[in-house]
Amino acid sequence: MEVVGLNKKNILKISEAKKDNDFFKNYRLDSFFKFQKLDMPSFGPKVDIDFDKIIYYKNSLVDNNIANDWNNVLKPIVNELDSVGVLESEAHMGGIGVQYESEVIYHNMLKEIEDKHVIFTSIENAMKEYPDLVKKYFGTIVSNNENKFAALNGAVFSGGSFIYIPPNTHLDRPLESYFRINSRNMGQFERTLIIVDHDSSLHYIEGCTAPTYSDSSLHAAVVEIYVGENSKCRYSTIQNWAPNVYNLVTKRAFVEENGSMEWIDGNIGSKVTMKYPCCVLKGDNSNGTCITISVASKGQEQDSGARMIHLGNNTHSKIISKSISRGSGNATYRGKVYIDKNSNNSESMVKCDTLILDDISKSDTIPVNSCYNVTSSIEHEATVSKISDENLFYLESRGITEEKATELIVLGFLDEFRKELPMEYAVELNQLIKRNL
């Protein structure tokens, strides 16, 4: 089944294919109505999409069943996923879900994780098996009138992950989801909902890739995360979309008292990326961290950053942004820090560092910092630099080629990001950076 074009009839086709109940069918229709009313973003890169040409749904499931054994997945798909390292990474995870085009095609979790009563499944399964839990949070952290692409996701969402970590539960291994677009003009609109109940912790890892076509593809995901009291969630992602993909994502976490949310966000691929992970620090003594890298090569615009909204007392946030521009690429930090008038004794620190590798590339820093409380403070610093001739000369005098010397300097520049990743992902990041220099 393939659904092309955006209209009410096609949204109802997707809803029927998903066997939605009335709640989710009506949510899709309401989102489509809001999508029609909302304007395209008034800031950032130009987004030129013909919504009538996008494939909004494509099913690659065998017998409409999600497999937990790779032998039950189509062999060409297995070979393709194996070539990008998905099967190998599974050995390091507590559980993994794989989405191919519009559907989650593979899902598996270690028994020791299941024994802790952790729920890790596709969003569609969760809607059917845990409807009250899903409806309690779905669309409450990211509204379907948030922006045009959040509304689009609400209308046509398909696939994505649902995770529930029960109270007093800590996982020793990360959970992972992997998303693959493999068709021309394909749109992928996964919906991820994560709930970390009180006194618990989770590390969730996400990976994304697509092959290169002349036609543009669209990735418009929504991620909602609820972090309970005294809990911690870390969300690590490295996207390496092909340079024909528009990557337009809305991510937000809601953090309760003494909770902690960490976004570790890498953007290497895509034609255009617009992504600003957000923490709403509602509870007292809650904290949020966002560490990002963006690598913009020829023809790429990476418009990324973070948003920290301080509402509780004694809240703390930190944003660290690392950007690299080369080959006429444009890497922009766009961020917002807001400290409410009732958020006493709160602090935020923003640090933006940019490395420009040639004379034809560009980087901008566009912060909006607002502090409405005299007991609170925001610090912001930004640096822009190039690779100096002195550094290159020093390394070359030690017998290192110019190409290798440049590589070493860039990897050193990104060290603050790399050290936050699991070892196998840090190695993958190194390889991706080397291929993009």
Image (spheres, rainbow, N blue to C red):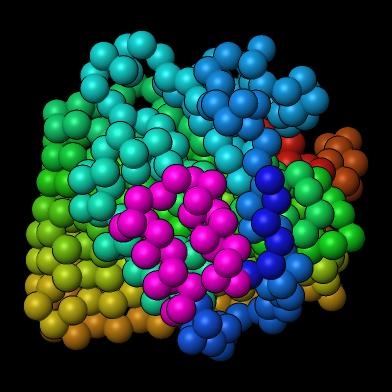
Residue 23 lies, with reference to residue 202, above or below; the image says below
Q: Is residue 387 found inside the magenta-colored segment of the image?
A: no
Horizontal arrangement in the rendering, residue 114 relative to residue 173 (left or right): left
Residue 61 lies, with reference to residue 375, above or below; the image says above
For the question of whether residue 311 can be seen, the reply is yes
Q: Position of residue 339 (x, y in %)?
A: 23, 76
Toward the viewer: 15 or 114? 15
Residue 253 lies, with reference to residue 164, above or below; the image says below
Q: Residue at x 34, y 43 (%)?
A: 127
Q: Quadrant of the rendered structure where residue 278 is?
A: bottom left
Tell me the quarter of the image containing the N terminus.
top right
For the question of whether residue 414 can be seen, the reply is no
Q: Position of residue 217 (x, y in %)?
A: 73, 60
Q: Quadrant of the rendered structure where residue 346 is?
A: bottom left
Q: Position of residue 387 (x, y in %)?
A: 75, 60
Q: Residue at x 14, y 29 (%)?
A: 168
| Magenta-drawn stretch, dominant element (helix, strand or loop) | helix
Q: Residue at x 55, y 36 (%)?
A: 104
Toward the viewer: 135 or 25? 25
Toward the viewer: 72 or 291? 72
User: Exactly how many numbered labels are in the figure?
Assistant: 0
Q: Is residue 25 found inside the magenta-colored segment of the image?
A: yes
Toward the viewer: 349 or 205? 205
Q: Position of residue 159 (x, y in %)?
A: 51, 44
Q: Which residues are magenta?
A: 7-34
